[in-house]
Each structure stands twice: as structure tokens, then as C-alpha cells.
Amino acid sequence: MFKKVLIAEDFQDTNQGILNTLRTQFNIPVIQEELYCDKAYNRLKVALSHHEPFELLITDLFFKQDHVDRKLTSGLELIRAVREMQPNLKVIINSMEDNPAKVNTLFKEENINAYVCKGRHGMAELVKAIQEVYHNRTFVSPHISLNVSDNVFELDEFDILILKDLADGLTKREISTRLKQRNISPNSESTIDKRVGKLFDEFGAKNTNHLLAKLIRKDKI
């Protein structure tokens, strides 16, 4: 079993629950915790420099802002920074996020090892995830079906109109004007913004160019 684990989580109660579970279920010798991503990164860095690296990072995706200045503000930023420093570190995400497309992107693009949904059965899932990851297998919360992803999401005619205009370099305001000229409704800028935001979520895209590239690869447009 893992000998050295770091928990990055900004809720102390959640931290304590994870700590108790790891100690009870696995008797892991070294379990440390950090409330901030920057401090978690520094702890990982120091351990690596001392040739005593952590073997597993358990992190949330979201960290609330407070009075402390931070460079790394999310679990995703922490994972990306750590991957550059220690590529072989095992990573388990423990979060409330349950969007299949987003979770799928985390596996494909961030190379995480497991994804656990916080909730009633969260600790039991975390135990299973640790066991699977230790044996070099991946784990996904049973509450998330990665089969229900962008592969089955169908674009409607309105989506395609917006996407074609975006691909032509039009702004959302210009798209709104063009829709009005064509007597197509809804045509407000806010509606377009919401629709594009939904597409970002469905396809796990970071920006418009990323969204268009993903859709082209999947023959959606």
C-alpha cells in the first residue's frame, strides 16, 4: 500500500474524514494535509528534493478564495504544476463536480488516476479508488457514467449556426445581429452566451478554439 499521501482540501472536516479513513483502512505511515494548493505544491516539491516523494495526491478541484494570496487557485492548476515536477505521482480527485464531460476530460488531458464524487458514499468510493490506483488501475465514481458524454450529445440547428459564425471569427454581439437580420430567434447576446457556455461544459472545452477543434475531430461540424 502507499506509504506517503498528501491531501489538498480546504475544508478541515473533509480533511479529517479522509485522514481517519486512510488510517483506519490502510494504516498508511505518512499522511499530510494542506488547505491551500500553493502549500500542497511546496510540500510535494520539498519531499521530492529530499528524495522522499509523496506517492499519492488526493485533491479537490475547487478551493474557496480568502485573504491569502495564491498562485495556484484550483486543484486543476495544482495537478498541472505537479505533473511537470513529478509526472509519476498518482492523483485522485475528490470533488462535488459530476459533469461526465468534464470528468472525462480530466482523465484524457490531465491523466488523473481516479475520480471520486463527494457525497453520502464518498468515503467508501475513496477507499475503493485508493485500492484500484495502488494496483495501477483507474477508478471513476459509479455516480458518473463516462458513456453519457459528448459522444451522445447532439447539436441542434441553432448550435450549428452559432458555431459556424464563431468559426468565421464573429463575436457574440455580431452573431446576435446576424440572427436578428435573419429573423431567427432567440437571438439575444445573453442567449448565445449561455448556449456557448453549455457547449463548453458538454464537451469539456477551455475556450472557443478548443471547442471548435474538439467538434471538428468528432465530426460534429
Image (tube, rainbow, N blue to C red):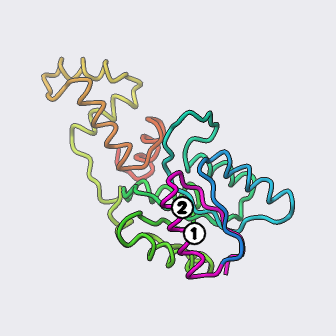
> Residue 158 in magenta?
no
Q: Nearer the viewer, residue 91 or 21?
A: 21
Q: Nearer the viewer, residue 37 or 113?
A: 37
Residue labelled with disc 2:
15
Q: Nearer the viewer, residue 136 or 169?
A: 136
Residue 19's disc number:
1
Residue at (43% x, 49% y) in the render: 204
Callout 2 amino acid: Asn
Q: Position of residue 13 (x, y in %)?
A: 48, 60
> Residue 4 in magenta?
yes
Q: Position of residue 194 (x, y in %)?
A: 28, 35
Q: Which residues are magenta?
A: 1-27
Q: Which of the image's four quarters has the C terminus?
A: top left
Could you give the CA–CA distance between mark 1 and mark 2, rounded to whole angstroms? 6 Å
Q: Nearer the viewer, residue 119 or 21?
A: 21
Q: Is residue 190 left or right of residue 143?
A: left
Q: Position of residue 206 (x, y in %)?
A: 47, 41
Q: Is the Cβ of the residue at disc 1 closer than 8 Å to that at disc 2? A: yes
Determine crowd level at label 1: few under 14, some 14-19, many 20+ residues with C-alpha closer than 10 A: some
Dividing the picture into quadrants, the one containing residue 197 is top left
Callout 1 amino acid: Leu
Residue 128's disc number:
none
Determine crowd level at label 2: few under 14, some 14-19, many 20+ residues with C-alpha closer than 10 A: some
Dividing the picture into quadrants, the one containing residue 56 is bottom right
Q: Residue furthest right?
A: 50
Tell me the SS state at disc 2.
Answer: helix
